[in-house]
Image: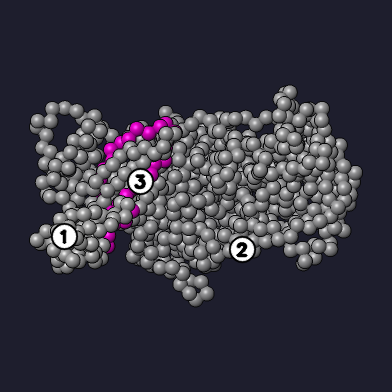
Amino acid sequence: CTWRIQPDMPGPGYIDLLTGTTVEPGAAGNEQWCDLLPGQVLCLSADNEDLGLMEKSNNFSLPPPRLTRQCLRAKVMEILCCYGNTFDIADVDFDRLARKLAENPVDLCRSMNPENPERKVVKWQWPTDLKREVMVPPGHSLMVCSPYPFRIRLDEETRNGCRTVACEKSLPLADRTFFTLITPIDTPESGVLRLLRIVVYGKNGSRHEKASILFTGSKIPSSVDTVFTRTDLSEGEHLFLSANGAGAVCRANARWGKLSSKYDALLAANLNPSFPEDRRIMFTRCRAWIVFQGYSQEICFDCLDRFGWDANRGYWIFKVPTGQGQSIDLMVSMALDKGKNLLGITFARILSDGRSEKLPDKQKVRLILRPDIEDRNFHDVTKAFTGPENAWPAAVKAYPDGFDFTPAHDRRLSVRLPGGTFVHEPEWYYMVYHPLEEERGLDPLSDLFSPGYLSLFLKGGESACLTASVNEDPACDLDASLLSPPRTVPLEKVLRDTLSAYVVRRDPLKSIIAGYPWFLDWGRDSLIVARGLIAADMTENALSVIKQFGRFESCGTLPNMIHAGDPGNRDTSDAPLWFAVAVADMLRHGHGTVLYEKCGDRTIEEILLSIGRSYVNGTPNGIRMDAVSGLVYSPAHFTWMDTNYPACTPRQGYCIEIQALWHFTLELLAMIDPGGPIRWENLAEQVKRSVMELFVLENGSLADCIYAGEGVSAKEGELDDSLRPNQILAITLGTVKDRQLDMTILDACSCLLVPGAIRSLADAPVNRPLEIVVGGTTIGDPLRPYRGRYTGDEDTSRKPAYHNGTAWTWLFPSYCEAWAMVYGDEGKSTARSFLSSSLCFLRTGCVGHFPEITDGDFPHAHRGCDAQAWGVSEWIRIWKFLESA
């Protein structure tokens, strides 16, 4: 770059006002020059004091006021056109509207769209939302905010490359921060992911950042694509789950033979025939090969063509090379038999149809299968040197077509391949690496034992079925016919099949597995899931679950969880109240006789009255109603946010969702017991008044909890100002019916939303410290307790994050429900659009299921249980609600 020497710029050295560095250009005659890198910009001054002037000014990058006013007026006109208000603008006071825009863009947009009460603006805040994938429903504007000036560009990937759909420069707000507003952009029905690129001009220089923005679709699809190509599976983990309705599970990786976790197993059996208990992993993996004329090819991801699932069955289709440029198509399908610890794996060679690149059907190929087995509780790992290396080989009994493995008197694994041959050739596979366990701070290494291998020959069109059973008849005959996976499956069928996977036998009734792979049946989870079963017209199962837990009611308490056959853990203040909600759902769906159903020697109506009276008078485990306020006191760790040891979310006192549940229960009791000795309707009104009096914060949202010790009234407790999503239930359960307050609650909780889930805590400072102590050391910042990633050591990392930042799938649909309740029919389309963001879960992680949680921070990786019951049940319930007239 060359320039003529000026009188006020004689050189020889200059200061670069952009970087503060000294620049010494070359000189010759009356010219100077310097070399510039590609894209480099210099702003040179001969006076070093100019740099100090710029550092003192906060407004050096602002345009002149007249230009700012014109830009605000232009944005007002854009907003007017966006809402279809095209009319004679001669009498429009654009200066007044521009001032209003600079004061509060959201209020201006609302005033320009009076026919729709929704807030049609989604806020994206720099830098906080760099860690969150913000969702923008159809018809909504995107408002980008920052404390400093900025420029943004919104890009979208298309088949023809990257396309810029918006480009904006920030405008100043009255509070001296900055914003811009991207008015609604056309979005495909299925939604689209766009990339927000932002350059922020701060005091310490410019910062280039980017963030993912999900523009959600306008429709919930009617079907689900259940087939994955090899390319689809190349990124992330994809798991298949098959359940037997009696506590056993098959959890297989879509990449055949891959083991990422100690919970991966082809057969994790439930040894108890009456109820679910800790599963026993006995058949972990099945390695396989195809051999033709000495050419051997392992069946693995390298030759996988596609994977699919339908209901309880998974399918793998392989293109297996056989040498000399030819191959065969092999389909493997797998499912657990209902009610039995029995797995069937079908291997079918697909007909070649005379294609030259395929091995002729008459040519036999040899299928070799080598089962890898264990004998352990599914929470443990196998270490061969601790005894199994000597004991397990001796526990194998060989048969012509398989083997039995009997490591103890109460369990026997039987593996058979009818028509095949078993070769007894024991081997160990040491130190199998489980990366997910290492990520969780656990032992990632385990050993596998293989007693030998099985083999048989297959022609084109032939199939064989390997069976693996625990304590079942090894001669059982499973269907080995050739089946084809469907390309798409109706959404409702997928969801009903998924929900059915959690319903299990607990004699003489049914219960709910809270989540796979490690949860058993929990009280609150089961009763919340019952609501989804009712919405899905699976009322027989729902009633069985209600009766199952109702028969355990004692003095107002229900089991927090049932550990095998022990219902003694009753540390829950919400399960009994969810029982009332589930019963009310049965009544609403036309099952008027549910109150008279027997749970043991009592009716459901009698159980409800016992719960109500016990809460008023106090339960044996410390739950009681505060006589002054009518609110219910909950001991520490008795809510769904129950993390303990260390105490991470104690919530001792009066929790907002408990009050919402209590108010709902009181209204139900007032209906079924109008003339009883306790005036339930008066108590319900008292609770509603107390919530409005005690829980409303200065910002208009609700406190999450009034902290109080045992015996302390709610009016004497300490407000917790942390922003959590539990307050949404105050809307959906009917406790708060003030529309302005409801709208404020929804606005406040909008910063918790991520696709398909809702954060358990806002990424913001709190006034009441949340101190988490492990081994005498305080973990994290008590005044900034948000933790956005659920990884690492359990006590020092995962537990502190579990309810303090991780995003939960089960409560997210309630936000959509609340939106539709507050905004009526006009809000249902927005609620559906938000709800549709969950459907990405069906094709990621454990396919067909919703995860328990995701990271609160982008990219919101799946965490916790791969498949959680109440996530899918609540989604079904709200979907049905939104689809209703």
Identify the element where label 3 is drawn.
strand
Residue 165, by quadrant, is top left
Classify 10 Å Cα crowding around label 3: few (below 14), some (14-19), many (20 and above): many
Image coordinates of residue 505 in percent, x first then y, are: 68, 44
Residue 627, by quadrant, is bottom left
Amino acid type of the residue that numbered disc 3 sits on in the rendered structure: Leu
Q: Which mark is residue 442?
A: 2
Residue ranking furthest to the top: 354
In this rendering, the label closer to the viewer, 3 or 2: 3
Q: Is residue 52 above or below residue 298?
A: below
Disc 3 from disc 2: Cα separation: 37 Å
User: What's drawn in magenta, residue-wise?
Assistant: 179-208
Image coordinates of residue 317 in percent, x first then y, are: 68, 35
Amino acid type of the residue that numbered disc 2 sits on in the rendered structure: Leu
Residue 822, by quadrant, is top left
| Quadrant in which the N terminus appears | bottom left
